């Protein structure tokens, strides 16, 4: 972690995350000390599988001082909505979403389909924007990492951050549409 700070040419790292809960108790103790000393600003925990969501929720409920959570979440992977996102919201834990497009799986599922006309009600002009707006329309979500190398895709993804977001009813409509495909 010190080497990371050196490479960043900074005395303070904004966010240091415990990835995939590897030795999380030891790591959390270390990060709490570093935070108290001013070496890091925020502490996060991550996992890449939905099977770890119950453990993550329990950690958030029991352990004070966790500022961020990074998880996979998409229209195809909605397990976080049941317990994990409500716990994060109740604990004021910021949520970073990874894998919002399921490595392109969401796009493959809608290939050849027109975007529903009702997507314009929340300013979605592409499938990518609909998928992202569904996520950022969830109040517990802080940030989504779309992960692309394509600059055109990045420009389209960025547009999801502008305009109206789907409300709870529109998010339900999106889920129902998705589940009917």
Image (cartoon, helix red, strand yellow):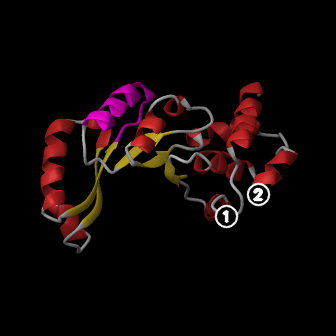
Q: Is residue 143 above or below residue 48?
A: below
Q: Are marks 1 and 2 in contact (CB under 8 Å)?
A: yes
Q: How many marks?
A: 2
Real-space Cα separation, disc 1 to disc 2, in angstroms: 8 Å
Q: Is residue 19 above or below residue 157?
A: above
Mark 1 burial class by Cα count in 10 Å: few <14, some 14-19, many 20+: few
Check disc 1 and report its element: helix, strand or loop: loop
Residue where numbered disc 1 is placed: 162
Per the rendered image, the range of residues in magenta is 46-62
Q: Mark on residue 148?
A: none
- Left or right of 71? Residue 17 is left
Query: Split into 4 quadrants, where in the image is the C terminus?
Result: top right
- Left or right of 162? Residue 100 is left
Q: Which numbered disc, 1 or 2, marks the residue that appears first in the sequence?
A: 2
Could you tell me residue 21's position as x and y percent?
Answer: 27, 36
Check disc 2 and report its element: helix, strand or loop: loop
Residue where numbered disc 2 is placed: 123
Could you tell me residue 99's position as x and y percent?
Answer: 52, 43
Q: Is 49 in the magenta?
A: yes
Q: Quadrant of residue 56?
A: top left
Q: Quadrant of residue 169?
A: top right
Q: Is 89 in the magenta?
A: no
Q: Nearer the viewer, residue 55 or 75?
A: 55
Mark 2 burial class by Cα count in 10 Å: few <14, some 14-19, many 20+: some
Q: What type of secondary structure mainly makes up the magenta span?
A: helix
């Amino acid at each position: 972690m010190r080497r990371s700070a050196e490479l960043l040419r900074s005395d303070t790292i904004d966010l240091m995350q415990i990835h995939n809960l590897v030795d999380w108790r030891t790591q959390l103790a270390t990060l709490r000390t570093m935070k108290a000393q001013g070496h890091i600003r925020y502490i996060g925990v991550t996992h890449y599988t939905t099977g770890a969501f119950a453990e993550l929720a329990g950690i958030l409920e029991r352990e004070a001082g966790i500022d961020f959570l990074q998880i996979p979440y998409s229209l195809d992977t909605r397990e976080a909505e049941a317990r994990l996102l409500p716990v994060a919201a109740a604990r004021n834990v910021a949520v970073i979403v990874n894998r919002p497009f399921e490595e392109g799986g969401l796009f493959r599922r809608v290939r050849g389909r027109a975007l529903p006309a009702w997507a314009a009600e929340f300013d979605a002009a592409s499938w990518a924007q609909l998928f992202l707006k569904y996520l950022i329309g969830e109040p517990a979500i802080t940030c989504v990492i779309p992960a692309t190398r394509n600059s055109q895709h990045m420009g389209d993804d960025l547009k999801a951050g502008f305009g109206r977001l789907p409300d709870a009813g529109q998010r339900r409509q999106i889920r129902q549409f998705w589940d009917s495909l």
